[in-house]
Image (spheres, grey):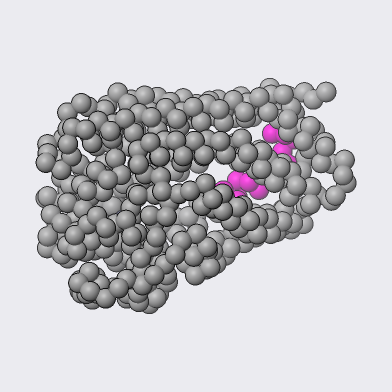
Amino acid sequence: MTKIDTNYYFWFILAAVIGIFLIEVISNIFNLRALSPNLPKEFNGLINDETYRKSQNYTRISTRFSLIQSTFSLLILLVFWLAGGFHFLDQWIRNFELGSITSGLLLITALLAANYVLLLPFSLYDTFVIEEKFGFNKSTLSTFFFDQLKGLILGALIGLPLLAVLLYLFEHLQYAWLWGWMTVTLFSLALTYIAPTWIMPLFNKFTPLEDGELKQSIITIAQKCDFPLKEVMVMDGSKRSSKSNAFFTGFGNNKRIVLFDTLIDKHSTDELVGVLAHEIGHYQMRHLLQSMITGFITTGILFFALGLFLNNSSLFAAFGVKSTSVYLSLIFFSLLFQPFNTVLSVLSNIRSRQHEYQADAYAAEVTGTPGDLAQALKKLSKDNLSNLSPHPLYAFLHYSHPPVLKRIAALRK
Ligand code: ZN
């Protein structure tokens, strides 16, 4: 029989997972309460009563759904943990006597696979019931199935070798945290580099934007901003959802701007130029580089801390496991580090919101017509049924972009 040691680690991790869950629940309840029946004046004439009610319903239904999903995930974790699941799984895998790296790959894959299977019904329900009900879903069951399949194969091809390397480093090398840090950093740099050419085309079709007024306006704004634009591509976002977006990819002088077909359909040329000027603003103010550097530093801290808690027998005892291993250290550490990760994600949202204001200001200045971007933002909010009055606590914790009314107010200045 397995025995869970209710030591400091046990109570800390238990308090952390429950505490994070409660913050999630409370912020969501506040957010639902903040839904106001009165349409903000800014949207008069653009959104009618029916659409406004629909957008509030969308917020309500997706909030409830995500709360059910978080509750389910928390319960599964607690039951598995307290019933000694980690101990049994480890014992079962040790029986095969596969060597520590293969055992580690097997155990972590088993945990991820179980998590995937348990959450798959949620994902199906979200796409084919909720998104469908509000008219967003455009993907068929077969698109969904192949997306999942491609995602899993890619995940295995990329994740398993990386995991094997990390397990090896932590078992055999001194200063493994340093090597692990470097490995993950190089790996993610390489991924960012190959993603636009090798990975993204597996999921979507990219076609060059046809010549015409829009393309000409985009080239003009790129030149005005000294943006090294190589190509403007259109992505078939409509294959899956009617929600829309724009972004740019590529390194150095090889920048490609990608517009969702759904974005082009619904916006005027001036509005699209406003959106692009905003994206160029991110580039000109080196926001991407700043995020990469921050990511690099936090990964370093993470690996250093992992090194400190590696094969810590008290931490293992809190999960009812007697014999320590590098692979279970990774799992237990990720639970131990959850509060830190939550704080990091809130901090990164704060920074991201500042970046959004800066990019908006850049766009306003360079186009000279802030009203176009404001109009585009309003239309995006309307078409994506965004919550126009999020609760400040909810927005503070979860929003990577400022609430749309605040962005518009800032643009008007
Ligand atoms: Zn932005």
Residue at image x 48%, y 48%?
Answer: 140
Question: In the depicted view, which residue is nearer to us: 85 or 115?
Answer: 115
Any part of residue 305 in sight: yes
Q: Quadrant of residue 166?
A: bottom right
Q: Quadrant of residue 390?
A: top left
Residue at image x 33%, y 53%?
Answer: 244
Which image quarter holds the N terminus? top right
Question: In the depicted view, which residue is nearer to us: 409 or 49?
Answer: 49
Residue at image x 23%, y 61%?
Answer: 272
Magenta: main secondary structure equals: helix
| Magenta part of the chain | 302-316
Depicted 311 relative to depicted 99: above or below: above
Residue at image x 34%, y 33%?
Answer: 58
Question: In the depicted view, which residue is nearer to us: 173 or 245?
Answer: 245
Q: Does 4 appear in magenta?
A: no
Any part of residue 363 in sight: no
- Give the image location of residue 327, x and y in percent: 72, 45
Depicted 200 relative to depicted 352: above or below: below
